[in-house]
Image (cartoon, helix red, strand yellow):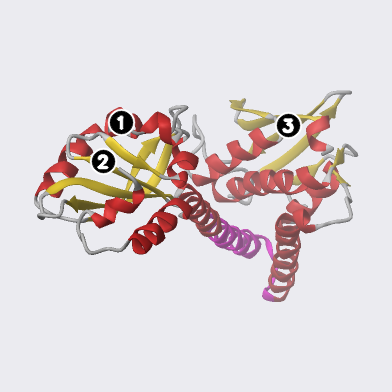
Amino acid sequence: MSPANLHSLSDPHFSADTAAWLAAIVEDSTDAILSKTLDGTITSWNAGAERLFGYSREEAIGRPISLIIPEDRSHEEADIVARLRLGERIGRFETVRCTREAVPVPVEVTISPLRSADGTIIGASTIARDIGDRLRHANEQALLLSEMRHRVKNLLSIVQGLISIGSRRADDVQTFTEQLTARITSLAAAQALVLHSEDRADGACTTLGEILAAVMAPYGDDGIALMDCDATVGQHAMTSLALLFHELATNAVKYGGLSNPDGSLSVDIATDVAMVSIFWREDGGQRSERPQAGFGTSLLDATLRGLQGTIDREWRDGVFETVLKLPRDALAR
């Protein structure tokens, strides 16, 4: 059965020219267009189906439609056939089909009944459109929105923490206002480093110490001791490292060493030819045997994977220590 007579079955008055036009439209479509009998035997298969599913026309025609239906979706076919027998058109539903290499493909499918000249339903035509790019784009948007919400929430938590710490430590309102303004300005500079470093086209690099100082600048130096480090950080690793320090600092403000006026934070760094080890120690934070899980934890883990690094966290004599190990070659990229 050719693509042309998929449609002429229901209208015997189609001319040869009309059938030829329909055949050309079907064959040139970027969508997969195929037909099958009610018992599921494939009867036509256009070039779009070849591209999407990987089977040639000769390989597909005559074989069962289960050829492209994953086992966990086999129940769909019985429901589809039952609806087709009632003359129902099944419009645009999302499902999954599989390629010749057994790779799942998300598709949007429309299925219409095919009738013979006397009106008897004898099969179905299917149009399948690959929606993988659309779903990936939607997932990326969802991730970006999630990260945006997380960043905004973190920024608010940081500002609240700065206000709380500053109000307890400042001698007067004017000093408090000046210090808070300076720290929020520094916070904005650190955020700019995180958001815009990947947009730099000059291949510029910086050092680990400079990134650490920029991210921690909003918190001042009261109770904070940072070790400098001249390990090179390249353009591609810059954002990841800034995000990593930003996340650790946020946690310190929320419930760690910077969450109370008597707390403290120290960051020591050891380097060798291959590795940079960062020892992030917080004293005076809320005691918890395991870090709180959430988007921040996922972001931290994903950032470390991108830097090919590892993280270990544990309490040592009342001090919560986070040890980061980062390969120097990954940082230099």
In the rendered structure, the answer to whether residue 237 lies left or right of residue 136 reads right
Q: Are marks 1 and 3 in contact (CB under 8 Å)?
A: no
In the picture, measured across the screen, residue 246 lies left or right of residue 81, that is right
- Residue that appears at 30% across and 39% down: 43
What is the distance, in whole Å, between disc 2 and disc 1 at their CAs?
9 Å
Mark in front: 2 vs 3: 2
Viewer-proximal residue, 25 or 252? 25
**Which element is circle 2 on?**
strand
- Determine whether 232 is above or below 164 in the image: above
Residue 149 on the magenta segment: no
Q: Position of residue 36 (x, y in %)?
A: 26, 40
Q: Main secondary structure of the magenta part?
A: helix
Earlier sequence position, callout 2 versus callout 1 = 2
The C terminus is located in which quarter?
Answer: top right
Which residue is labeled 2 in the image?
A: 36
Q: Is residue 212 at least partly visible in the picture?
A: no
Where does label 1 land, which residue? Answer: 62
Q: Quadrant of residue 39?
A: top left
User: What element does badge 3 sit on?
Assistant: strand
Q: Are marks 2 and 1 in contact (CB under 8 Å)?
A: no
Horizontal and vertical percent position of residue 83: 13, 48
Point out residue 231 in the picture as x, y percentages from the top left corner.
88, 37
Magenta highlight range: 150-173
Mark 1 secondary-structure assignment: loop
Report the amino acid beneath label 2: Lys
The three-letter amino acid code for the residue at tag 3 is Phe
Q: Quadrant of residue 26?
A: bottom left
Q: Nearer the viewer, residue 300 or 113?
A: 113
Q: Residue at x 62, y 25 (%)?
A: 316
Q: Which residue is mark 3?
A: 279
- Measured as percent of width and height from the top left, residue 37 is found at 21, 39
Picture disc at residue 40: none
